[in-house]
Amino acid sequence: MLTMAYIGNGKSTNRYHLPFVRKLADKIRVKMIYQRSQSSWPELEGIHYTHRLEDILTDTEISLVAICTPQSAHYDLAKVCLEAGKNVLVEKPFTDTLSQAQELFDLAKTKGLIIQAYQNRRFDSDFLTVQKVLASGRLGDLLEMEMHFDYFRPQVPQASQSFKPEESFLYTHACHTLDQVVSLFGQPDKVHYDVRQLLGANRMNDYFDLDLYYGICKVSVKSSYFRLESRPSFALYGKQGTFIKAKKDRQEEDLKHFYLPDHADFGLDRPEDYGVLTYLDQEGQYHQEKVVSQVGDYSLYYQALYETLAEGAPKLVKDHETLLVMEMLEEGLKTLTDKDK
């Protein structure tokens, strides 16, 4: 049994962590949650809620601490937990800077501890389905892949009158999609950055379009706050075929409606949500078919983390992958600030 605690008692902890870690109650026990002030989220039975961080740091039963606070606090809290001898799970984006991330990995290594980014979206159904299609070989050599994470929320950038790196759309959303790319393809040969402030200089970053090149293949990671009609979640183009997955993973949508993973149909795609695969077979015959979506399940992240901490399995999210994502986020923001010089 792995005993853990959370720092932070907001949406991240209650929506994206607890419903999934509680599916592994036979392996992981949540003992304590630290909240600086009273939270609007209801307290759960069997968990001790505290306003004293020291209660977590000094509890010898707790071997893993998950940090689910605003990004600006990640580095300091992770460092305190590592120095207290705790393994650490950090929400994304991991830290404010690449140098902070490197320092934390180095500290964990000297302490013989694990620190890892919470890249739960490796277990999105649309991303898992893309991997299934790629593995089938029906697309032939992959030439291009487009990934979109769109919203129509103009009120968000309109409400911000200044630029803050930690609140940039690049940091808060490309941390999902860039990790998916890195987990599939590794280090790109080169990256082209197009990071914008659509409402003008010194306003919020509300758009980005990053092109990552892998040999003949280009992977585009795109997001905007001004898309009344969203672009497909994934669009793949190979020498022999295409795969278009219009709809995103449904886990987040269900969670927003407090429809939790204890329901058998939680997060499941409907037939109308399935992606469409179009390809030519070896005889040149044309095929078009719907691909039944893989089942997304964020609890699989916690299963992998348990296997690392309790059984010595390799880390799901490698240190160099997180560092690469941080490097690209940092470089992307530099191109934005350079425009103002």
Image: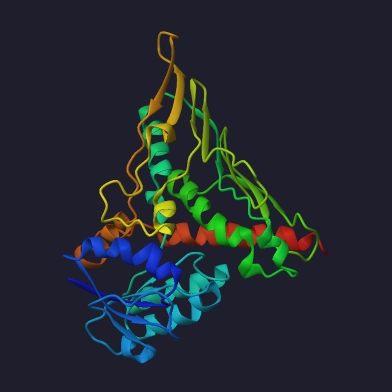
Q: How many marks?
A: 0
From this view, report whether residue 138 is shown above or below residue 165. above
> Looking at the image, which residue sits at the far right?
341
Please name the colour scheme applied to the rendered image.
Answer: rainbow
Residue 116 seen from this side? no
Picture quadrant of residue 77: bottom left
Percent position of residue 119, x then y: 42, 58
Left or right: where 23 falls relative to 51: left
Left or right: where 301 falls relative to 78: left
Q: Residue at x 49, y 67 (%)?
A: 94
Picture quadrant of residue 22: bottom left
Q: Residue at x 65, y 53 (%)?
A: 225
User: In front: 270, or 89?
Assistant: 270
Q: Which quadrant holds the C terminus?
A: bottom right
User: In front: 278, or 159?
Assistant: 159
Q: Residue at x 38, y 32 (%)?
A: 271
Left or right: where 83 falls relative to 150: left
Percent position of residue 226, x then y: 68, 49
User: In front: 141, or 268?
Assistant: 268
Residue 320 seen from this side? yes
From this view, report whether residue 27 is shown above or below residue 44. above
Picture quadrant of residue 200: bottom right
Percent position of residue 209, x then y: 65, 47
Left or right: where 254 falls relative to 204: left
From this view, report whether residue 278 is shown above or below residue 215. above
Percent position of residue 123, x then y: 37, 50
Q: Residue at x 36, y 28 (%)?
A: 136
Q: Which quadrant holds the N terminus?
A: bottom left
